[in-house]
Image (cartoon, rainbow, N blue to C red):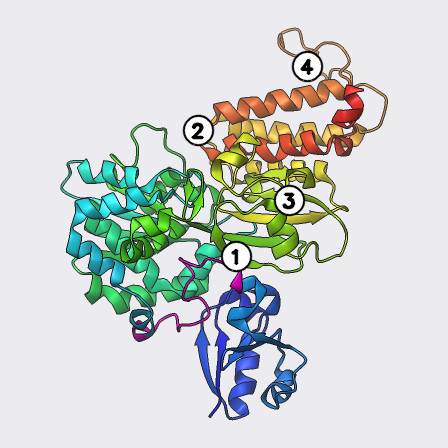
Amino acid sequence: MTLVRISDDALALACGADDVAAAFAAAGCTVERVSSWGMHWLEPLAEIDGQGFGPLEPGDVATVLAEASPKAIGPIAAHPFIARQQRFTFARAGKTRPLSLEDYAANGGWQGLAKAREIGPEATIAEVTESGLRGRGGAGFPAGIKWTTVAKASADRKYIVCNADEGDSATFADRMVMEGDPFMLVEGMAIAAHAVGAQKGYVYIRSEYPHAIAKMEAAVRASAHLIAPVELEVRVGAGAYVCGEETSLLNSLEGKRGEVRAKPPLPALEGLFGKPTVVNNVLTLAAVPWILANGAEAYAAVGFGRSKGTMPIQIAGNVKHGGLFEVGFGITLGELVNDIGGGTASGRPVRAVQVGGPLGAYHAPSDFHLPFDYEAFAAADGLIGHAGITVFDDTADMSRQARFAMEFCAAESCGKCTPCRIGSTRGVELIDRIRARKNADFGRAPDRVEALPQMHNARKVERSLADEIVLLEDLCETMKFGSLCALGGFTPYPVLSALRNFPEDFGAAPAKEAAE
């Protein structure tokens, strides 16, 4: 009987994978539901004896089984999108059944935990430190240093918290881990708990991920006996973007409003319920089993500069070949967009690429030489964040995108600090004024409030378009350096990068023209 493998990943389901699977079953095939390969433009993708077919519809099944399908893509493992990758975290993607303990163990699962138990907590932390693993949630803080801080803290109880509140646009790697390889995350958390002396761990998953929640709950139940005495529990997020910030997440876990905490104290010393807590992203914890099983040296041998190991990069937006591409740091942005992504889906020229989610900078094609690396993007006034990239073609209005950034911040702000809460709303108003006046040669007189004698800092004379843009830059500086967390602090990145790289969309002269 023909064995057909089809993903039960949420994206594949949304594309109709269940109907295709049912059609194969009706044709007498044995259907096995596996994780996704990450080639999203080919979903639903079916695999038969290593050969791939996609994107399929139920009506394609007969031609596939007759070996006459025009949707055949050849051996999946040899497909250029897969063959070019270095898959450490996603080594099992597309190959195993997500909730099969047998599949997981047969494909390298639990080897990392066994090694950690063999060498002990101190050596386990040393392995993570020497690997150079940095937090994959966006901050890029060395995981080994955070673990060391928690391990050395004196307390009767410690916690591991997995931040699975993946809310950035163009990101889906966390979801793919939890839906496709949930035991890997369980193993990573168990290793972290063993290393720092934690008794309990929580996986905080955003409520918009029902399939990931169900998979993780099932995986935690099925593997409880393998990670004991460590206990894991899945908690569903409260639906706020700011709960992806670690201190807001801790408040939410404690049943409080998802509001940012001032630091210090650091969560590593006073975290969940006031106890030392490791808060790591899904991809950070998911990288740990491979490091322990294969050694820190092997992991650190891949990468670029201080960015060691691989990064699961998520390619989305107006792009031909969207999906999950795991590779060592150092690949250029241009390679990701043009060679891997295939350029825009519309066929029009690429105008901008946003890297790092809704708070990431907009990069023009002139930045395509940048290596994908924390330091290189920081030097270019950008960030790689959670490694999501969104492609825009030349029809995009970048002043509108800048307005969206401010509007997003205003909607998602927890309200704790003034620069974020008030600054984002003023930012929307200011960009609206700029957009209404771009290319128009008239000024704006002070309004009734600005004209009041007690408004000492308000401008009393007409404000030109250039004055409004300077005001926007000043506002961004205040938000960047005055906000309590990354939501308010990073919102200026998309706004200022749009203004810097695409000034004509704001009615300002391009930088080169202005200089002349």
* Closer-to-camera residue (372/445): 372
Determine crowd level at label 4: few under 14, some 14-19, many 20+ residues with C-alpha closer than 10 A.
some
- Give the mark nearer the N terminus: 3 vs 2: 3
Q: Residue tagged by mark 4? A: 450
Which labelled disc corresponds to residue 484?
Answer: 2
Task: Answer whether residue 84 is magenta in the image.
Answer: yes
| Residue position for label 1 | 325
Judged from the image, the secondary structure of the residue bearing numbered disc 1 is strand
Mark 2 or 4: the one toward you: 2
Q: Which residues are magenta?
A: 83-102
Q: Give the SS element for disc 3.
A: strand
**Majority secondary structure of magenta residues:** loop
Q: Secondary structure at mark 2?
A: loop
CB under 8 Å between callouts 2 and 4? no
Q: Circle 2: is it few (<14), some (14-19), or many (20+) Cα within 10 Å?
A: some
Q: Position of residue 225 (x, y in %)?
A: 19, 66
Answer with mark 2 or mark 4, whichever residue precedes in sequence.
Answer: 4
